[in-house]
Image (tube, rainbow, N blue to C red):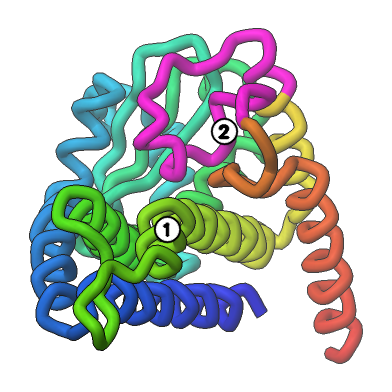
Amino acid sequence: MNQIKTVALLGILSALLITASYWIIGGASGAIIGVILAAVTNLGSWYYSDRIALAAYGAQPVSPNQIPALYSMVERLCHRSQLPMPDLYIVPTSSANAFATGRDPQHAAVAVTEGLLRLLPEDELEAVIAHELSHVYNRDTLTQAIAATIAGAISFLAQMAWFFGGSRNREGGVNPLGFLLMIVLAPIAASVIQMAISRTREFEADAGSARLTRNPRALARALKRLENLGRELPMDSNPAFEPLLISSPFSGQLLANLFSTHPSTEARIQNLLQVEQQLQQNESVF
């Protein structure tokens, strides 16, 4: 279901881009320019996403000899999910969080904070790692890059309208309705849809973790613990990288759930309980 939602949201975002080009440019040439420029920026960021994100958090690579228990856990989960072993990194902060990055499973990296390793029990840590590996398996960085590219093109078109005027009707005058709607509402709508896509990917990664570990409640406990820890010790983070993290470091600071990159913890727990029921039903068949 989450896969269907993601495809549907990407379709809506694409339709919004076409509509924006119609009202602002009045043709396809301007939209093509916007898409190309946005693609160069966003897909370039996606290609180097691992370096950018790891540098932003000051993540340090770790070897199997430094944290053997973590390496063994990741190797076991990778073998179970048939994924190549990602590079492992530690973020030197007492806050508890984790993220995965990389343009594909062959160039993936998983980073965990020192606080996460210290504060989570083994089963909850395994569930968090499985969540991040599910992002890698689902190629969510690619999905987010596509969404960012389209949203960036819409913002570019709106900026063109701001500097060069709105779309023109058949008499050659500025269309005030198209100008107003596209320059103000289109970028906001694109951001909302982009964040909705991010939330669907979190739900899917949660479900992937539950199926991989066969222990949905471990991730549910971890998410609740991370939420509480985040209030006590929020992670010093750039909002641009918030979608990468398993738990939002800006809990309580967002204007509304509509503009959140993560579902609420309660909604994620309810989703995990539904996955648990599905797993139990599947097991009862055999």
Residue 79 shown in magenta: no
Instruction: Please tell me which residue is depicted at 76% across the width and 33% down the height of the picture.
Output: 224
Q: Is residue 258 left or right of residue 40?
A: right
**Which quarter of the picture shows residue 124?**
top right
Which one is in front, 158 or 226? 158
Quick one: quadrant of the N terminus?
Answer: bottom right
Task: Please state which of residues 186 and 47 is positioned toward the viewer in this rendering.
Answer: 186
In the image, residue 235 lies at what x, y percent? 49, 17
Q: Is residue 2 above or below residue 159?
A: below
- Numbered tag placed on residue 180 in the rendering: 1
Residue at image position (54%, 46%) is 261
Place residue 221 in its image quadrant.
top right
Q: Amino acid at mark 1?
A: Leu
Closer to viewer: mark 1 or mark 2: 1
Q: Amino acid at mark 2?
A: Ser
Quadrant where the C terminus is found in the figure? bottom right
User: Eyeballing the image, is 96 above or below 135?
Assistant: above
Q: Is residue 247 visible?
A: yes
Give the magenta-colored segment's residue range: 228-254
Which is nearer the eye, 120 or 15?
A: 15
236 falls in the magenta region: yes
Query: Residue under circle 2?
Result: 248
The one nearer the camera, 282 or 79, is 282
- Depicted 147 relative to depicted 263: above or below: below
Which residue corresponds to the image point at 70% horizontal and 35% vertical from the top-left?
A: 222
Expressed as whole percent of the image width and height from the top left, the position of residue 37 reads 10, 61
CA separation, marks 1 and 2? 33 Å
**Residue ID at (64%, 26%):** 251
